[in-house]
Amino acid sequence: MSGALKNVTDASFEEDVLKSDKPVLVDFWAAWCGPCRQIAPSLEKIAEEQAGKIEIVKLNIDENPATAAKYGVMSIPTLNVYQNGEVAKTIVGAKPKAAIERDLEEFLGQ
């Protein structure tokens, strides 16, 4: 992967996220959100390092409000891990890479 995370939309969410055969972490973000930009490099690094275990995608809440509303995303960054079409874990707020990885341990099989 070339560093940039895949962007999903309201239209592609079901296909890209809910129907995935591996866990998918969705980064709910917006261009004006400083903490969202702060955690982006960490998420890209985790996506690279854990490529076979978890997929990490981004959803811009300004461009895709329906999905954000459906899952009750009130503050960003919100990271939801979806497994088998359900929210398996929610992480809210900017955290260092190591803390995000700890939160994801159950999905990474570490």
Image: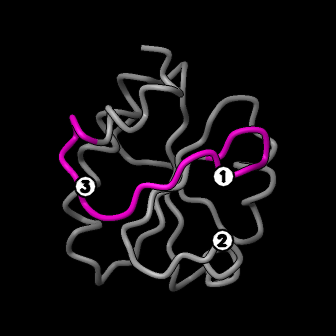
Which residue type carries mark 2?
A: Tyr
Whole-percent x, y for residue 9 in the image: 65, 67
| Residue position for label 3 | 39
Residue drawn at the location 43% of the way across and 23% of the way down: 50
Magenta stretch bounds: 82-99
Whole-percent x, y for residue 62 in the image: 51, 85
In the rendered structure, which disc, 2 or 1, sits on the residue that comes first in sequence?
Answer: 2
Dot label at residue 71: 2
| Residue position for label 1 | 87
Dot label at residue 73: none
Query: Closer to the camera, 68 or 62?
Result: 68
Which residue type carries mark 1?
A: Val
Position of 39 with respect to 50 (left or right) is: left
Q: Compute the Cα span from label 2 to label 1.
A: 9 Å
Residue drawn at the location 54% of the way across and 58% of the way down: 7
Whole-percent x, y for residue 5 in the image: 44, 48
